[in-house]
Image: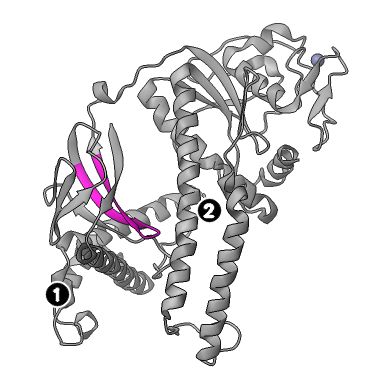
Amino acid sequence: MLLSHQIRLDPTPAQRDYFARAAGTARRVWNWALAESNRQVAAGQKPNAMALKKQFNRVKYSDPDWLDDDGKPWVRTIHRDAHAQPFANLAKAWSRYFDQRCSGQPTHRPRFKKKGRCRDAFYIANDKFRIEGTEAVLPKVGRVQLREHLRLPGRIMGASVGRHADHWYLAVQVEVPDHVARLRRTGDGITGADLGVSAAATLSSGEKIPAPRPLAATLRRLRIRSRRQSRKLEAAKAAAGIQGPIPKGTRLPESKNRTCGARALARLHARIARVRADFMHKLTTRLCRENQTIVIEDLNVRGMLANARLARVISDVGFYEFRRQLQYKATRYGIRLVLADRWYPSSKLCSACGDRYAALALCERTWTCTACGAHHDRDVNAAVNLQRLATGAHAAQTALPVASRAVTPGTAASDGLAGDGKVTPARHEHGQQDGSGQEENAAHLCARFR
Ligand SMILES: [Zn+2]
């Protein structure tokens, strides 16, 4: 099983400088390769990563674009992996684009990377570096201090050095033998988990897990720092005599003040991301450890993010990340992850009698079933309904037409739900991105945000 461990680095100033230059080279090579492949596509040719790389190798030491002020080729000062890998990445990006376009999914062509807007990272092949205790020996820079040991046993497949705010990290990919990667569960529960915003997750046991909501808590600070930053940008524009939007290709002079401000803003964003990642990992690990089956909703996250009013709350809780982590941890703990169909009315079914309360308003946090008189908490009821998809208990209890209670392994499909409880087994792709469920899902989520 291919796993990755991200370790914080403690580089010296000289090493930081090299990392920044190597990441910049990787970005520039990507942009060169993309421009060249775009040109070839426009000319009716089929670009090929190997051919592009050869073409680059011919110009990289001689073309004036790739020489520094003294006329020396600066690519020589950067290790080869940093400027060879972008070609492989670009080939992957193009084939993903063509696959998605052929299968009718919304997609876009590979994009140019912009300094300060893209992720700064570069690749190192596994035969070019080694890890010795809490030190990594990297090409060109030598020994770099690590904040912790590499925790994963197995064969190292490669690594990349990347930056988050002003910290550098080494992400090491390790092929961990399956019997080592498997982790032991502590329980055999079957849990439905309903994601929301008032509580990050509500479990079918009735437990509500509050989210740390790092973004909400630091939003004020974020606003202040963003505002300061945009004032500095306005000042820089005024000094350069630019009104309105900055014309393409203009580079504003960088003041020290503006650079410092940008760094402070980036640090705050990075901190929020760390708090969120910590919470998410602990939650998904706990769920995988205690259960043999987990049922979650297949929410159309991308469709919901398109709704500007919902985007912030949704990304604050990190719905997509929740599902991604459950998917890979499910393999490690050997559990079954079930995704309920996105049209399954988990909130509207009475978990006691199976009656469907179609008129459930978006703002109702609790409701009483008109058929059996049961009083429900909205989120707990939804979680219980999700859990029942896996157990098939609903079909047994309800008066709905029950064709068969066949629960096929891996799908947990229960026919007793009168056609609106389709269940799909866990999928590893991005979900259906047709956007058709957008409206309904947005409204459905609104309910959770009151
Ligand atoms: Zn009822």
**Residue shown at 34%/74% (left/top)?**
39
User: Above or below — where is 123 with respect to 372?
Assistant: below
**Colour style of the rendered protein structure:** one colour
Q: Amino acid at mark 2?
A: Pro
**Residue shown at 20%/42% (left/top)?**
157
User: Above or below — where is 301 with respect to 351?
Assistant: below
User: Above or below — where is 33 with respect to 339?
Assistant: below
Looking at the image, which residue sits at the far top? Answer: 396
Categorize mark 1 by other alpha carbons within 10 Å: few (<14), some (14-19), many (20+).
Answer: few
Q: State the residue position of label 1.
A: 58
**Residue shown at 39%/70% (left/top)?**
115
Is residue 32 shown left or right of residue 228? left
Looking at the picture, how far across and down is residue 329, in whole percent? 40, 29
Looking at the picture, how far across and down is residue 109, in whole percent? 44, 62
The total number of labels drawn is 2
Is residue 379 shown left or right of residue 278? right
Q: State the residue position of label 2.
A: 106
Magenta highlight range: 157-173
Asked if the magenta segment contains residue 127, the reply would be no
Q: CA distance from mark 2 to mark 1?
A: 36 Å
> In terms of sequence position, does the residue under pointer 2 or pointer 1 come before the other?
1
Is residue 66 shown left or right of residue 341? left
Q: Nearer the viewer, residue 15 or 431?
A: 15
